[in-house]
Amino acid sequence: MPFTFDNSYARLPDAFFALTNPTPVNAPELIALNRHLAADLGIQLTQLDSAEGLSIVAGNQLPEGSKPLAMAYAGHQFGGFSPQLGDGRALLLGEVIGKNGSRYDIQLKGSGQTPFSRRGDGRSALGPVLREYIVSEAMAALGVPTTRALAAVWSGDQVLREGYEPGGIFTRVARSHIRVGTFQYFAARQDQESVRILADYVIDRLYPAARKTDNPHLALLECVIQGQAELVAQWMQLGFIHGVMNTDNMAVSAETIDYGPCAFMDHYDPTKKFSYIDQQGRYAYHNQPAMAHWNLTRLAETLLPLLADCDDNAFANAKTALDRFSEIYQRELVNGFTSKIGIENADENDWKLVQSLLTIMTSDGADFTLTFRHLRNAAENCEQSQLLALFKTPEAISGWLKAWLTRLKKEKDGPEKATHLMRKINPVFIPRNHRIEELIQAALKHNFEPFHQLHQVLQHPFAEQTEFVDYEAPPTPGQEVQATFCGT
Ligand code: AMP
Ligand code: MG
């Protein structure tokens, strides 16, 4: 018995889910198993890392204690509301209690049709499975709250997308898969009782401290707002673009979830978007905080009847909570970006210094990750050539460097402390899009070496790994990926 399940979601009322079994696949092969994560989750590794374990993560065999279910949810997709989406190609196998005492969902993605599949086949193509594995594990190593990857499987079956492609099955781990859209599902049906049950469940599971306040449901809203404001500020500091921030893709646990057409940007461009379906740039890099706030407003609307005894007070409570988003986000963003240039306890002028750097990076098309990575060398050992090479007009950045180095001298422990701070916060390695594309192309031909290699490098994103220096590099013009696809 690899998992010791305790399935609290399955104990909620029937309207919350549809009990569904996975559909077996023909000839599954294990591509990756996350042994570290399995150990943290208290999973019996020898049993998971076996023929029986493969059958489980392929959806061919149900583990003991599992009560597989597809969760019901709704969602605003690119601003338009769908009252019923739900897990159309995913199943919650069950919940385990990790070694840290927290509860985690174990979910299969790509395991076959469910009552929520609509016209979909319930399957995943291999490419998106490997992208989600790589990017979510990279995010975890970068210190960003995220769902995790437990396993990736080659299904042995083909799925029809643009043409036929190999299929894959992904095992995902989350503190919970409850989304803003889960609340919207019941609110849209005017089922206030279910909204209350869901809110109480989320409080008990994710935010138990909210229970001890005078207004637990308001405290729940405040917790989600805080978590999301901090999360999006972290994305921004890493140049991460989620790509499809629909309300059904925003977890109330404030973990990054649903890595569809996501990507890290190479050269800095605040208007950058990758997703092919996001033609208007709704979820472009610079719109992400506003979109998170928009989604949280949708969450607040579902909770209104729980927030106070009368409408006016409920509305005022929601507004006060939502107004705090910008404050928290801005504080995190300023702290984060000033730390990226080595400044602790920053003031307004330091934030202006960051902004002028970003302006130069934009006009000069400088690589986002490498700029901060090489700034460190400039402070550490006055080595500026690698940094200057990232800019089209080195004069502009030279002037900025002078001002910055003068500012660093005023820091309490000078440049030494600054470089220490910068080392901790500025990654050397990110999952660059062209590398992901490359590993997917290899995997489609059943070569998983590039996948394992990139995954290994990204386990230690802040460390210089001289043998992998190639993985630092941005794409050459020929390698640049112009658009990403959900691949669903
Ligand atoms: P996503 O774009 O992955 O956030 O999914 C949006 C909605 O479409 C969710 O309800 C998914 O379950 C559903 N969906 C996506 N792909 C498939 C598929 N291949 N088969 C069935 N449902 C799907
Ligand atoms: Mg989704």
Image (spheres, rainbow, N blue to C red):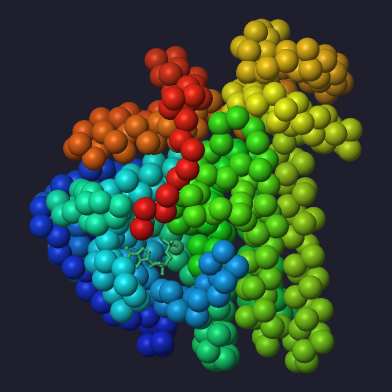
User: Does 422 sit left or right of 461 as displayed?
Assistant: right
In the displayed structure, 208 sits above or below 19; it is above
Which of 462 and 261 lies nearest the eye of the viewer? 261
Which residue is painted at 23% across and 56% down in the image? 159
Q: Report the image quarter containing ligand 1.
A: bottom left
Q: Position of residue 439 (x, y in %)?
A: 32, 34
Q: From this viewpoint, is residue 323 visible?
A: yes
Residue 12: name its quadrant: bottom left
Which of 226 and 275 lies nearest the eye of the viewer? 275
Which of the image's four quarters has the C terminus?
bottom left
User: Does 313 sit left or right of 90 as displayed?
Assistant: right
In the displayed structure, 208 sits above or below 102; it is below
Which of 200 and 435 lies nearest the eye of the viewer? 435
Q: From this viewpoint, is residue 204 visible?
A: no
Q: Position of residue 278 (x, y in %)?
A: 54, 54
Which residue is painted at 41% across and 62% down in the image? 104
Which residue is painted at 43% across and 74% down in the image? 85
Which of the image's four quarters has the N terminus?
bottom left
